[in-house]
Image (cartoon, helix red, strand yellow):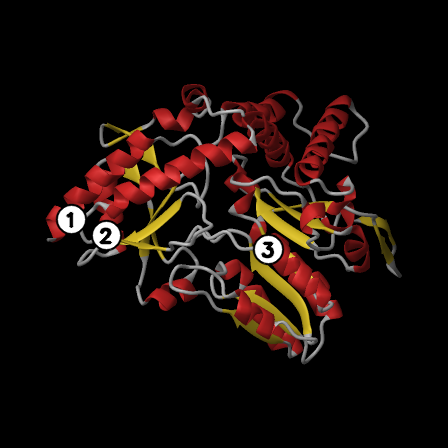
Amino acid sequence: MKTIDIRKVRRDFPNLRVKVHGKPLVYFDNAATTFKPRPVIEAVAGYYQEYTSNVHRGIHELSEKATAAYEGARDKVQQFLNARGSKEIIFTRGTTESINLVAYSYGRHFLKSGDEILISEMEHHSNIVPWQMLCEEKGCVLKVIPFNDQGELSYEEFEKLLTAKTRLLSIVYISNSLGTVNPVKKMIKAAHGRGALVLVDAAQAVSHRAIDVQDLDCDFLAFSGHKLFGPTGTGVLYGKAQLLDAMPPFHGGGDMISSVTFQKTTYAALPYKFEAGTPHVAGVIGLGAAVDYVLSVGFNAIEGYEQKLLEYGTKALSAVPGLKLIGTAKEKVSILSFVLPNAHAHDIGTLVNDEGVAIRTGHHCTQPVMKHFGVPATSRASLTFYNTAEEIDALVKALRKVREVFS
């Protein structure tokens, strides 16, 4: 079984050599965005330095090279997700835009008053607000699957909420604030049994787990490039071709047309129907390089290494007097959210930053989760395969100093 060569991996990420307040940086904010390995940085720089050009419409050499690299990245993502074809891969600005695309293009044209949309209590705001907006406009009904105090969805309640009126289940694969891994394959099968479509928010899952959309049988799946060690401002919407074909465009403009007259416009075929205007060419090329990099490390190695980090981190943080972990699901990834008595999350974040440790504090765009646990905010340490047990020790040491201040 392949294992992580941690020294080699850490050499690939220039950001890991940064110092904060004179101390080596410990970066535990990977759920917000990941660092970029050198091959991604070089791919983006190479485009800007050697063949900057717009794609698809040029016949000169630079444009052809840029187009080949851009479409090559689409092929890489298709293989990465095991989609049936590259036309099922739509490039967007991120998970948020991908979800909004489905809400706008599918929801506004195929859902009607009284139809039910099912989400969960642990969703990111990006998988709540678009559906609320759609329900307000169309008269649809939004229903919410609850979770228990360990941060696990109630499958029994899900089955009760899933009815003949359910038209869409939009569910997070892995919670960004709890680390919970939801049983999405089982939920997809159940939803399809009721005639509902399923969108999977894979923003967090994409860097922790291998994803096979054909095996999941999801109808749509969304993720962001910057969570996968790729550039910001890039994202993917996977959709089954027959659904995308039936959906109207999300944006109008250049590159998504077949022909335009003042009397009528006809639209381009998939995937270009949904990619109006000049795309983030450099970012998509960088995303392709990120896919290559992650696959070179290998998900078997990543999952095994991160599980050990999670186990070590859970034990180490639990030993800090008074610290309470928020989210203790049996199935979870290396995300550790916590609270300390008498200390607000923002104060914790400030004080550990003085020790060179970067964590995320706040509601993590999951305010309903905070309400469930009766806290205004949590501190979150999110780990990935370039982190180490020694870095966890640095966080624990910093938290003990925080406790001394507030005790």
Label 3 vs 1, first from the N-terminus: 3
Image spot of residue 243 (x, y percent): 78, 57
- Residue type beneath disc 1: Arg
Q: Secondary structure at mark 2?
A: loop
Q: Secondary structure at mark 1?
A: helix
> Can you say whether 140 is above or below 150 in the image?
below
Q: Quadrant of residue 198?
A: bottom right
Depth check, front residue: 80 or 231: 80
Callout 2 crowding tier (Cα within 10 Å): few <14, some 14–19, many ≥20: some
Place residue 184 in its image quadrant: bottom right
Q: Residue at x 76, y 40 (%)?
A: 86
3D distance between C-alphas at marks 3 and 2 = 31 Å
Residue receiving disc 1: 403
At x 10% / y 53%, what residue is drawn? Answer: 407
Is 327 placed left or right of 63 in the picture? left
94 vs 384, left or right, is right
Q: Residues within 10 Å of mark 1 (few under 14, many from 20)?
A: some
User: 44 and 89: which one is in front?
Assistant: 89
Q: Amino acid at mark 3?
A: Val
Q: Position of residue 312 (x, y in %)?
A: 33, 38
